């Protein structure tokens, strides 16, 4: 029987290992490969049996590469990239233009997505993928082109490009402001209303009522009731629906105020020490479509003033 020239494991096992090593998660690797978590785990186990060595350290609720896994990952990534490039060349395919953006759910839902049609209309050949989450991802490791983050200048670093700053002040629905039984003419009138709070997320401490009330000399004010939210865009939807008063972030809410879906009953505001910054992965600097998207974002932010 003729010996095989190359003693290699199946390609699908190598693909499963590479995805699991990149995400450090069998579940996220499965989502990417359209496989179940257990299927990815079996593929990796088969690969470990082939090499006779553990490729991962399976910790409590965490996954880490072993020394053998780190060695294999470097080679597998290089080989798979070469195979992919050869496939594209042989099939005569053009590289698909994509821009992957990560940002918070509030920024995505209230500011970025409502404006996105302006970019896609002038760049119909570019697919924009928005990942909206409060989780801070590693741009280089996770294959993300652009991160839009709510940072101090120091945290953003020298490479961060500032889009705009932010002020915080109370907002409510026009209907709630017009309620004759519960006037909203001065900050002390808040005791008759439901106050909406943000729990967690970037800058959430600025959206807590006690510091703002303290600045208004209203420390200890007791509202009629309180609602808590974990996502900023959900809290703002509750405000639009007339469920209470929240501390709003401008300019994220400028459009809703211009549309008269929200109003600012008082003008007392707090300037945030943070701003929205653009951060870019190393690989994306070679992509013309990313440069075009960044230029569009900066122009849109400039229009905010």
Image (spheres, rainbow, N blue to C red):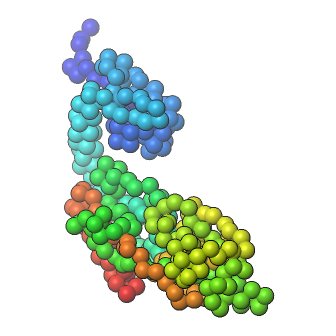
> Residue at the location (58% across, 76% down)?
219
Please provide percent x and percent y for residue 24: 38, 39
- Tell me: residue 49, above or below residue 58: above
Left or right of 12 on screen, residue 77: left
- Tell me: residue 83, above or below residue 14: below
- Number of marks drawn: 0
Q: Nearer the viewer, residue 148 or 46?
A: 148
Q: Nearer the viewer, residue 61 or 246?
A: 246
Left or right of 212 on screen, residue 5: left
Which residue ends up furthest to the top in the rendered image? 1
* Quadrant where the image shows the N terminus: top left
On the question of residue 111 being in view, the answer is yes
> Residue at the location (45% across, 67% down)?
203
Please provide percent x and percent y for residue 257: 56, 86
Please provide percent x and percent y for residue 244: 67, 76
Left or right of 81 on screen, residue 40: right
* Quadrant where the image shows the C terminus: bottom left
> Residue at the location (64% across, 76% down)?
221
Please provide percent x and percent y for residue 188: 64, 84
Query: Quadrant location of residue 246?
Result: bottom right
Which residue ends up furthest to the right in the rendered image? 181
On the question of residue 109 being in view, the answer is no
> Residue at the location (61% across, 88% down)?
265
Query: Quadrant location of residue 74?
Result: top left
- Tell me: residue 72, above or below residue 202: above
Query: Quadrant location of residue 7?
Result: top left
């Amino acid at each position: 029987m003729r010996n095989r020239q190359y003693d290699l494991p199946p390609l699908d096992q190598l693909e499963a290992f590479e995805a699991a090593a990149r995400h450090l998660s069998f579940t996220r690797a499965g989502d990417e490969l359209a496989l179940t978590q257990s299927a990815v785990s079996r593929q990796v186990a088969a690969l470990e049996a082939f090499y006779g060595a553990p490729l991962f350290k399976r910790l409590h609720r965490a996954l880490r590469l072993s020394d053998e896994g780190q060695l294999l990952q470097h080679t597998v990534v290089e080989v798979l990239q070469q195979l992919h490039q050869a496939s594209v060349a042989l099939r005569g395919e053009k590289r698909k233009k994509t821009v992957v953006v990560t940002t918070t759910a509030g920024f995505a839902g209230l500011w970025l997505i409502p404006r996105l049609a302006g970019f896609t209309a002038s760049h119909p050949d570019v697919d924009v993928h928005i990942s909206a989450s409060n989780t801070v991802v590693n741009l280089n490791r996770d294959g993300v082109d652009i991160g839009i983050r709510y940072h101090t200048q120091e945290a953003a670093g020298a490479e961060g490009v500032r889009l705009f700053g932010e002020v915080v002040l109370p907002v409510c629905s026009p209907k709630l402001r017009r309620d004759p039984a519960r006037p909203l003419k001065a900050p002390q009138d808040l005791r008759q209303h439901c106050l909406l709070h943000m729990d967690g997320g970037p800058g959430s401490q600025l959206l807590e009522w006690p510091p703002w009330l303290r600045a208004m000399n209203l420390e200890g004010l007791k509202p009629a009731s309180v609602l808590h939210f974990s996502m900023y865009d959900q809290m703002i939807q509750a405000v639009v629906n007339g469920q209470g008063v929240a501390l709003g972030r401008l300019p994220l809410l400028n459009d809703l105020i211009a549309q008269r879906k929200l109003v600012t009953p008082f003008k007392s505001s707090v300037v945030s020490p943070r701003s929205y910054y653009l951060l870019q992965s190393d690989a994306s600097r070679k992509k013309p479509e990313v440069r075009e998207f960044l230029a569009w974002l900066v122009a849109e932010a400039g229009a905010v003033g």
